[in-house]
C-alpha cells in the first residue's frame, strides 16, 4: 500500500514580491505575472522620485490598471509601460492638487474664520438685540440648537412637535436673525 502524499500548503502571493503564482482576480482569471514581477522595481523607482506613501499609492493604482488588460495584447517593454502609467497617474495627482490649491486661493474670504479680537462690544450688542427681536418660538429653537447644542430631534421631543416643524422654525429663525443683523 502506498503512502498518500501530504497536501502542499497554499501560499498567498505578496504584492511586492516576485511571485510565481499570481493572485486570482474577481472575475476568476489570474492576472499576468509579468506585472507582479516588476512591482518591486516600480516601487523602488517611484520612491526615488516621490514620497514613500505616494509611491506606494501610485504603484498599487498602476498595478490595478494593468492587471485588467487583455491577456492577448503582448507587451514588449513591461517596465516602460509600468513607468508610463505611474507617471501619468502622478501627473493627475499633482494636477488635482494644483486645482484645489488654486480654488482655495480664490475662495472668498467671507468664509475664512474671523479673529475674535475683531469683534467689538457693538457687534455683541447687535447680536443680542437681533436674538431678542425674534418671536419667542423661533428664538427658543435657535438658542437651543445653536447655543444649547441640542439636535432637532431633541428639541422636537421637548416641545412635542415634529422634527420637520423644528426644521422649519430653525430655518425661519436663522433667516430672520441674519436679516435683522444686516439692517
Image (spheres, rainbow, N blue to C red):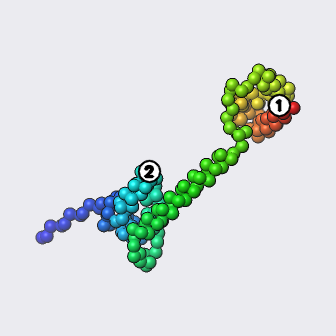
Residue depth check, mark 1 versus mark 2: number of the one nearer the observer: 2
Is 153 located above or below residue 33 in the figure?
above
> Left or right of 106: which side holds 65?
left
Q: Position of residue 3 (x, y in %)?
A: 15, 67
Q: Residue furthest right?
A: 183
Asked if 118 appears above or below 71 in the picture, the reply is above
Residue occupying the point 43% across, 79% down: 72
* The image quarter in which residue 19 lies: bottom left
Residue 145 horizontal side relative to residue 134, left or right = left
Which residue is at a point 43% across and 66% down the rendered structure image?
82
Residue 157, horizontal then vertical, whole percent: 72, 32
Please give left or right for residue 49 compared with residue 103 in the image: left
Expressed as whole percent of the image width and height from the top left, the position of residue 99 reads 62, 53
Residue positioned 20% across, 63% down in the render: 6
Q: Which mark is residue 51?
A: 2
Q: Which residue is mark 1?
A: 181
Image-quadrant location for residue 15: bottom left
What residue appears at the point 69 percent right and 32 percent down from the top-left corner? 114
| Image quadrant containing the N terminus | bottom left
Amino acid at each position: 500500500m502506498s503512502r498518500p502524499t501530504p497536501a502542499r500548503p497554499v501560499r498567498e502571493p505578496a504584492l511586492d514580491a516576485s511571485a510565481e503564482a499570481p493572485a486570482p482576480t474577481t472575475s476568476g482569471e489570474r492576472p499576468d505575472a509579468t506585472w507582479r514581477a516588476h512591482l518591486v522595481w516600480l516601487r523602488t523607482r517611484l520612491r526615488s522620485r516621490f514620497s514613500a506613501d505616494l509611491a506606494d499609492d501610485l504603484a498599487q493604482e498602476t498595478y490595478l490598471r494593468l492587471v485588467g488588460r487583455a491577456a492577448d495584447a503582448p507587451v514588449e517593454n513591461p517596465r516602460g509601460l509600468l513607468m508610463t502609467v505611474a507617471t501619468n497617474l502622478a501627473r493627475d495627482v499633482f494636477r488635482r492638487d494644483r486645482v484645489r490649491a488654486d480654488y482655495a486661493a480664490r475662495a472668498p474670504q467671507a468664509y475664512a474664520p474671523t479673529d475674535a479680537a475683531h469683534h467689538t462690544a457693538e457687534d455683541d450688542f447687535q447680536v443680542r438685540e437681533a436674538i431678542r427681536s425674534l418671536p419667542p418660538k423661533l428664538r427658543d429653537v435657535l438658542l437651543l440648537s445653536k447655543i444649547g447644542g441640542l439636535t432637532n430631534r431633541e428639541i422636537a421631543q421637548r416641545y412635542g412637535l415634529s422634527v420637520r416643524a423644528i426644521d422649519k422654525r430653525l430655518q425661519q429663525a436663522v433667516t430672520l436673525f441674519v436679516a435683522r443683523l444686516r439692517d
